[in-house]
Amino acid sequence: MHNSTDLMGIAEPQDNLMIPSLPDSISTTPDIFGPNQKLGASPVTIVAGYRPGIVGAALTMHLNFYSRVNGWGIEFETSAGKSLCELMTRLHKPVNQAWSAVRTVPAQDPGMLAQEQIVGVVFVDGESLGEEGVARLRAFIVDESARGLGAGKALFRAAMDFVRETGFRECRLSTMASLSIARKIYEKEGFEQVSEEWSDTWGVPVMQLHYVWRRDRGQGEEI
């Protein structure tokens, strides 16, 4: 049974709305992004590891989208919040990691400090599936205000670099059928769809697609 709190994907235009995914998954260069790696001229930095506010930011970005599009509310928020908080308690283990896309907003007034905002997140969970060598890509999302800055693909590249370097033989994720842009990115990376199912965990039925990346299938295309 797949965990429905793992919605994930890239927001994209559909019916005049931006559609991302927290079923489990955004524009960048092919470089390996380590901690605090700048994306060229972009004002967004990819930061690995725990960052204060990462869970709250992840929930806010998902709720801003899903409450508007699917009408998901308190049940979704509490379920996703518990799931991500539980992962945070295991983040110190070498098979788990998180990344934030951080944007620096200049101070509006002299004497004030610039503000840093988390505008995208992705998580790799190497334990929750209970299979050695199998990871799960979780809660990948970029805020609408930061799309087009390269944050999405950079987050995804950082996560997949970690999957490869840590030695996982498989990585799994779930997304929604409507997220065609996200699906193309996954497929270019070598993910293959293995199943699909209707889910109405939070009251509105959605088609979830389940993908698997396997190390022995190759490295995928450049994204």
Image: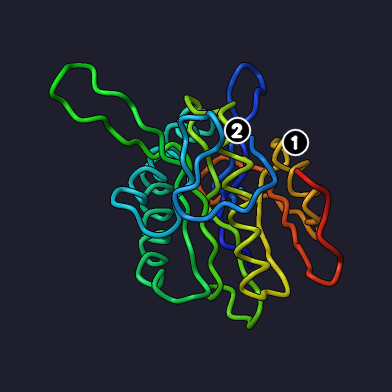
Name the quadrant containing residue 174: bottom right
Q: Of the residues shown, which amino acid type is indicated by label 1?
A: Ser
Which class describes the residues within 10 Å of circle 1: few (<14), some (14-19), or many (20+)?
Answer: some
Residue 13 position, x and y percent, is: 65, 23
Q: Quadrant of residue 87?
A: bottom left
Q: Residue 131: which disc?
A: none
Q: Image quadrant for the C terminus? A: top right
> Outermost residue toward the bottom?
132
| Amino acid at dot 2 | Ala
Residue found at x 64% / y 70%: 165
- Most extreme residue toward the left is 111
Q: Nearer the viewer, residue 78 or 218?
A: 218
In-front residue for pair 109/6: 109
Q: In which quadrant will I find the N terminus?
A: bottom right
109 sits left or right of 11 in the view: left
Residue 11 got which mark? Answer: 2
Identify which residue is drawn at 64% across, 41% down.
153
Say if mark 2 contacts mark 1, CB within 8 Å. Answer: no
Q: Which residue is mark 1?
A: 180
Q: Nearer the viewer, residue 191 or 63?
A: 191
Question: Where's residue 98, x and y in %?
Answer: 47, 58
For the image shown, how many numbered marks are present on the structure?
2
Q: Residue at x 58, y 80 (%)?
A: 130
**Which element type, helix, strand or loop, lies under badge 1?**
helix
State the SS at label 2. Answer: strand
Instruction: Give the alpha-carbon distance from disc 2 to disc 1, as whole Å.
Output: 9 Å
Of the image marks 2 and 1, the number of the one nearer the N terminus: 2
Q: Identify whether 123 is placed above or below 119.
A: below
x and y percentages locating residue 14 in the rendered image? 67, 23
Left or right, 133 with reference to 64: right
Residue nearer the viewer, 219 or 87: 219
Give neighbour class at mark 2: few <14, some 14-19, many 20+ (Cα, 10 Å).
many
